Amino acid sequence: MQLSKQMIVAGFLGLFAVAGSSSTSFAQCSVRNSMRSVALAWQSGFGDVSLDTGWIPGPVTRTAYAWDDNPSRGCIGAMTQNGTADFGRLAFDASGNASTQSAGMFLYSSGELGFSDTLSIQSDSLPVGTPVTLRYSVMLTGSVGIQDANPQSNIYTTLGPCATQNVSLPGSASQTCQNSVGATFVYWQLMNWSLNAPSISGIGPISSSIAANAEAIYRIEVLTPGVRIVSCSGRDYTAPVCDSIDFNRNGVFPEDQDVIDFFNVLAGGACAQCSDIDFNNNGVFPEDQDAIDFFTVLAGGQCGA
Ligand SMILES: [Ca+2]
Ligand SMILES: [Ca+2]
Ligand SMILES: [Ca+2]
């Protein structure tokens, strides 16, 4: 098939449509995983793959895999994204590469992960209406590596609910605001990303690749003594949040291979699809405590116990 300039432009514009769109109505507690993987050569392969779970009970982990080739123009490419949406933890990784001898190859990915919970502020000692001070924080860690003449990336998360605030990778932020005993409110957060290797759409020979991962951990600190937060999801946002024990992210856990892979990566080994070694998400790594917490959670214990 001969590719016209108009088709390329139209396709390119289409790539920048956001993968899914934020809904404003949530169930009482739910998560959403929306991703788009593009490795498009305008042939018969699945080169442009979108998925959207909608708002469903969490946690949820999904994979969006795109692959396409076009031998007549010497185009080939693949893009894989894994995304996990959990209460208090949103994480994704993306890995793709493409090469072209001609024109009209695309390599791009985007996504949005989110959770929405319903929280109620309770106390056994303080009367309803007593002012309560809460501190909300987010830590966004990860890395981006795009091999392309014009790499484009944007990874960020929201922080609320006191004030709307965006935090870009890598970054952390906190905000403190007032509430009151007896109050019930919706607490939601989103992580968004777009990764693009636009040069691959030019005249080849060109090779481009995209590799990125990010993890956002959300915590709430109760600064007023005698107060607790009860969530619809059951998540304790005041407690440490550990990563999944499915360290190698093969969907199988518990398994010995996760332990083996964890120590391999801790020792500096490579594992493209593995999680990060900051298992307890305290921002400190490498440290013995991550290994201790990994075994504690593996044995059925509490993160950070
Ligand atoms: Ca595993
Ligand atoms: Ca981690
Ligand atoms: Ca750590």
Image (cartoon, helix red, strand yellow):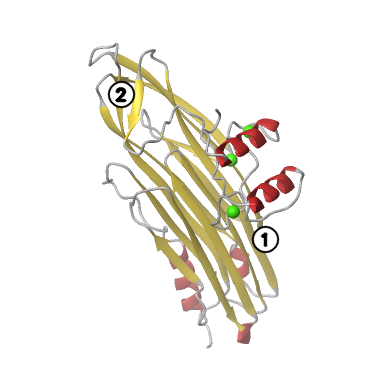
Structural crowding at the residue carrying mark 2, measured as other residues with C-alpha within 10 Å and reported as few (<14), some (14–19) or many (≥20): some
Figure quadrant of the C terminus: top right
**Residue 88 percent location from the top left of the image:** 44, 38
Q: Quadrant of residue 304?
A: top right
Q: Judge by depth and name the residue closer to the eye, 276 or 51.
A: 276
Left or right placement of residue 182 versus residue 159 in this view? left
Left or right placement of residue 281 versus residue 10 in this view? right
Residue beneath disc 2: 121
Task: Give the mark, 2 or 1, whose residue is nearer the N terminus.
Answer: 2
Q: Ligand 2 quadrant?
A: top right
**Residue 174 percent location from the top left of the image:** 48, 27
Structural crowding at the residue carrying mark 1, measured as other residues with C-alpha within 10 Å and reported as few (<14), some (14–19) or many (≥20): few
Residue beneath disc 1: 149
At label 2, which amino acid type do we have? Ile
At label 1, which amino acid type do we have? Ala
Left or right placement of residue 127 versus residue 39 in this view? left
**Label drawn at residue 11:** none
Image point 62% across, 53% down: which residue?
248
Q: Are marks 2 and 1 in contact (CB under 8 Å)?
A: no
Image point 50% across, 82% down: which residue?
44
Task: Kindly give the residue lying farthest to the front in the view shown.
Answer: 299
**Residue 153 percent location from the top left of the image:** 57, 52
Q: Judge by depth and name the residue closer to the eye, 143 or 227.
A: 227
Task: Kindly give the residue lying farthest to the left in the view shown.
Answer: 128
Above or below residue 45? Residue 140 is above
**Residue 228 percent location from the top left of the image:** 36, 22
Image point 62% across, 78% down: which residue?
75
